[in-house]
Image (cartoon, rainbow, N blue to C red):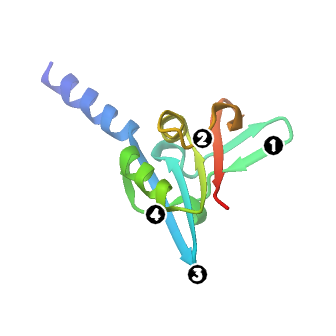
Amino acid sequence: MRGKIVYKTRVKCSALEVYANLRKWGRCVLLATCDAELLGKILREGKIVFEVREEFYKGPKMTVEEVIELMKQSTIVNMVGHNVVKKAIQKGLVHPDAVLKISGVPHAQIVKM
């Protein structure tokens, strides 16, 4: 029974972890973030082939809440995954109608002008 409790806790924590790759140049700040379990995956739907590439998305692993704070400071955000997109919607950073689903996985972008 003890092992089950540890397992459930571990799954819950990892489900809330995301990768965040922050790049800065001049006044522009680009944040690429994805749910941890999606890194390296290829999503396909019809003619769409979307690669969650390590070169673009992989950075430090952090919580969704930490990434939301980075989003507020970024000028461009590219996000993919149920957890990160859901939290961005909840915080009012993304409108639900602006979310594209690829193989059932949400993808959204923010561009601040």
Work out how far the residue at label 4 is from the one at label 1, CA to CA, in angstroms: 25 Å
User: Residue beneath label 1, please?
Assistant: 48
Q: Which residue is drawn at 63% across and 36% down?
A: 95
First in residue order: circle 2 vs circle 4: 4
Which three-letter amino acid code belongs to the residue tagged 1? Ile
At which x and y percent is residue 15? Answer: 40, 36
Q: Is label 4 in a helix, a strand or a loop? A: loop
**Residue type, label 3:** Gly
At horizontal 84% and vertical 35% (from top left) the residue drawn is 46
Which one is earlier in the sequence, the residue at label 2 or at label 1?
A: 1
| Residue designated by label 3 | 26
Mark 4 residue crowding within 10 angstroms, few (<14) / some (14–19) / many (20+)? some
> In the image, what residue type sits under mark 4?
Gly
Q: Is residue 18 left or right of residue 94?
A: left
Q: Which residue is identified by label 4?
A: 59
Q: Callout 2, which amino acid?
A: Val
Query: Where's residue 67, x and y in %?
Result: 43, 52
Residue drawn at the location 58% of the way across and 52% of the way down: 40
Point out which mark residue 94 bears.
2
Foreground pick, 10 / 68: 68
